């Protein structure tokens, strides 16, 4: 019996163990469920207790901080070296603090902007430097550092200066600009992106140049540049107002003919299209526009005597843009305008045309046929003058002028149109000498008057000339007439009989 029980235990012990493990698994699966009614336990064979190992959860790593961008120091340009220091710039983590170090010396501290850029000005001595940009935290602890940047600070160059130009510095040739700078250095003047001019600073530290600058408000800057044209430094901009520049007007000195009964004719030159005012001291004589050819003219009333004349170019508001030098004008005593009477038919003869008229008593008058002077006469006390002038057959335009002792024109009358008729054909000399009468010249005789007396036609005075010359050829008591305008009292003439049909 005992032996059978041992065999039974050996046979069913493994089965019990398996049953026990199944029960444990079921209990673990239903651990979170509501407890169900449990039936009365069925007696089972006790099984050995098995331990269930407990598995620990894996450790959780702390979150990793985002990396901070490495700061950067930009390479410096020549323009970054100024008298105020060296302009340093670069990039970094927005919002972070950047320190720039020159070896063991901190040059400056700056916050990186939201665009990731930063800049600061620091003082650095002339010579080589090794600069480093570091990102630091609030305690000044370095978070990261850029590679060092080697720079060389050049010898300081004096900042150039542009003087404010004076009104006299603006001329038709351009604007005269001047200032100061580093002796021997090259300076450039700029208007925005346009280079206005270049100059070299003299040993005295001054420079100047003349250049074209458009009129109006201008903002000019001056820079010091090296031989390659690179900017070394630049002065602050200077506001310059360039006035409108026009050619200087001019007044011509009036000629004697410019003084007339209507006034004085004044003329000159100026800027085409501009307005010129002519002044006699504080009195404005007149206003005129300059023509496209650059000339102007006007006639103004001036009293007899000395005057100081000035021409001004003015704008629409009457503001003076330029002015001429003073011109001294002396208005002579008024001289009566001469007059030329239209000759009558009887005034034309082979000796010439008898011309006459009126003028200033005692004045000298000249009669001109275009560019040819026909005759000269002196006005008598009664204000009349007369004379004979040689004029070819046909149409003529005669002008009469009053002149001074030197022959300068004082005034001139309008031209008069006259027509010289065809002269009658003279009778042959032999016939003229055959019949006639001798005549002794009396004071105030002249050939045309004698022709009128003996023939009733002044144009036949040539008969007397030809008859007298024919007689003189055989009779020495007659003197040959060489000049028809000149016969002398006491001279013996031969008055031929008037030929038939003449």
Image: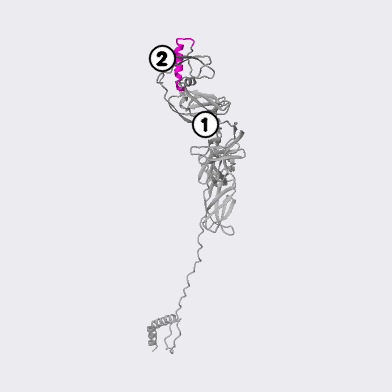
Q: Which mark is residue 431?
A: 2
- Circle 2 Cα neighbour tier, 10 Å, few/some/many (<14 / 14–19 / ≥20): some
- Residue 421 drawn at (x, y percent): 43, 26
- Residue 384 drawn at (x, y percent): 55, 27
Front label number (2 vs 1): 2
- On screen, 226 above or below 356? below
Q: Earlier in the sequence, mark 2 or mark 1?
A: 1
- The reply to whether residue 193 is visible in this rendering is yes
Report the front residue among 254 and 80. Answer: 254
Q: Is residue 315 on the magenta stretch?
A: no
- The reply to whether residue 408 is visible in this rendering is no
- Residue 236 drawn at (x, y percent): 57, 47
- On screen, 386 above or below 225? above
- Residue 250 drawn at (x, y percent): 55, 36
Q: Main secondary structure of the magenta part?
A: helix
> How is the rendered protein coloured?
one colour
* Range of magenta residues: 457-477
Q: Which mark is residue 413?
A: 1
- Asked which secondary structure carries label 1, the reply is loop
- Count of numbered badges drawn on the protein: 2
């Amino acid at each position: 019996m005992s032996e059978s029980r041992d065999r039974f235990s050996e046979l069913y012990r493994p089965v019990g163990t398996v049953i026990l493990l199944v029960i444990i698994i079921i209990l673990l699966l239903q651990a979170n469920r509501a407890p169900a009614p449990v039936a009365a336990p069925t007696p089972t064979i006790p099984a050995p207790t098995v331990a269930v190992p407990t598995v620990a959860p894996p450790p959780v790593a702390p979150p990793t901080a985002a990396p901070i961008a490495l700061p950067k120091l930009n390479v410096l340009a020549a323009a970054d070296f100024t008298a105020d220091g060296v302009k340093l710039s670069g990039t970094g983590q927005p919002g972070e603090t950047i320190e720039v170090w020159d070896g063991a010396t901190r040059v400056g501290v700056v916050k990186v902007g939201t665009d990731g850029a930063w800049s600061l000005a620091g003082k650095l001595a002339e010579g080589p430097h090794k600069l480093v940009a570091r990102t630091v935290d609030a305690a000044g602890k370095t978070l990261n550092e850029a590679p060092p940047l080697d720079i060389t600070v050049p010898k300081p160059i004096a900042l150039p200066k542009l003087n404010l130009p004076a009104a006299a510095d603006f001329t038709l040739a351009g604007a005269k600009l001047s200032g100061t700078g580093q002796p021997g250095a090259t300076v450039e003047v700029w208007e925005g992106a346009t280079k206005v001019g270049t100059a070299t600073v003299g040993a005295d530290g001054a420079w100047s140049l003349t250049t074209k600058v458009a009129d109006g408000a201008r903002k000019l800057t001056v820079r010091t540049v090296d031989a390659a044209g690179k900017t070394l430094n630049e002065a602050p901009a200077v506001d310059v107002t360039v006035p409108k520049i026009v050619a200087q007007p001019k007044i011509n000195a009036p000629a004697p003919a410019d003084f007339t009964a209507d006034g004085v004719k004044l003329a000159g030159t100026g800027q085409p299209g501009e307005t010129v005012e002519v002044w006699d001291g504080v009195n404005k004589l007149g206003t005129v526009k300059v023509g496209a050819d650059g000339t102007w003219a006007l006639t103004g009333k001036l009293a007899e005597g000395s005057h100081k004349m000035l021409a001004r170019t003015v704008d629409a508001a009457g503001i003076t843009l330029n002015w001429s030098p003073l011109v001294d004008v002396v208005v002579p005593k008024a001289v009566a305008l001469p007059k030329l009477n239209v000759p009558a038919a009887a005034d034309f003869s082979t000796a010439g045309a008898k011309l006459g008229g009126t003028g200033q008593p005692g004045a000298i008058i000249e009669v001109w046929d275009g560019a040819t002077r026909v005759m000269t006469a002196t006005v008598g006390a009664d204000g009349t003058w007369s004379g004979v002038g040689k004029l070819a057959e046909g149409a003529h335009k005669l002008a009469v002028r009053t002149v001074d002792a030197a022959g300068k024109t004082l005034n001139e009358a309008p031209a008069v149109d006259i027509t010289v008729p065809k002269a009658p054909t003279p009778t042959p000399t032999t016939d003229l000498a055959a019949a006639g009468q001798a005549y002794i010249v009396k004071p105030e005789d002249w050939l045309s008057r004698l022709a009128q007396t003996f023939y009733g036609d002044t144009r036949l005075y040539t008969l007397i000339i030809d008859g007298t010359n024919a007689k003189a050829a055989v009779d020495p008591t007659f003197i040959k007439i060489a000049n028809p305008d000149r016969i002398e009292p006491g001279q013996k003439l031969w008055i031929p009989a008037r030929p038939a049909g003449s």
